[in-house]
Amino acid sequence: MAASSSKSVLFVCLGNICRSPIAEAVFRKMATDAGVVDKWRIDSAATSTYEIGNPPDHRGLACMKRHDVPMRHVARQVTNDDFMNFEFILCMDESNMSDLKRKGNAVKNQRAKIELLGTYDPQKQLIIKDPYYDDTPHSLFSSAGKR
């Protein structure tokens, strides 16, 4: 990735081991396939401290592998600098949105536009449910390649 990226996006969920690293990996693959990855700064982070330093959930890793989507990430928490350094912060649900807005309001010179990732879903699924405790066939892990 180029240091002088003109565009930047940070994907955010609660723990940064399920939804946000999958979104990061899929977006990075799409940008790579389109030949524009060098024009983007792409990352993901958590609103909580629960999983800092951990790799993505094994189910998400397996799903990405099945779909030939590379995913390498170590969970981290959103920082104040993220609100100044990213153009877009795309989160997964209302709880993430509330946490981000509260934290972002305390940051001077915030430039990030905070939105729900689902806003961009052509199927209008606004909220991306947390699959961490969901082993049912309809969970994000089994459908990630279909989105």
Image (tube, grey):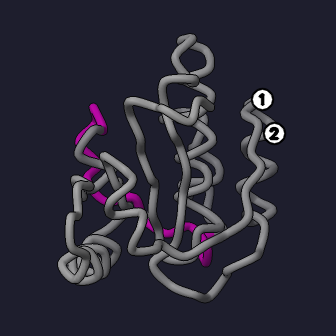
Q: Which residue is mark 1?
A: 68
39 or 141: which is nearer to us? 39
88 or 83: which is nearer to us? 83
Q: Position of residue 141 (x, y in %)?
A: 64, 53
Q: Residue at x 53, y 12 (%)?
A: 34
Q: Residues within 10 Å of mark 1 (few under 14, many from 20)?
A: few
Q: For residue 44, what is the image quadrant?
A: bottom right
The amino acid pointed to by label 1 is Asp
Q: Which residue is mark 2?
A: 65
The reply to whether dot 1 and dot 2 touch (C-beta < 8 Å) is yes
The amino acid pointed to by label 2 is Lys
Q: Which mark is residue 143?
A: none
Q: Is residue 80 above or below residue 82?
A: below
Secondary structure type for disc 1: loop
The residue segment tinted magenta is 121-134
Q: Position of residue 143 (x, y in %)?
A: 57, 44
Q: Position of residue 140 (x, y in %)?
A: 55, 54
Q: Residue at x 48, y 35 (%)?
A: 147
21 or 67: which is nearer to us? 21
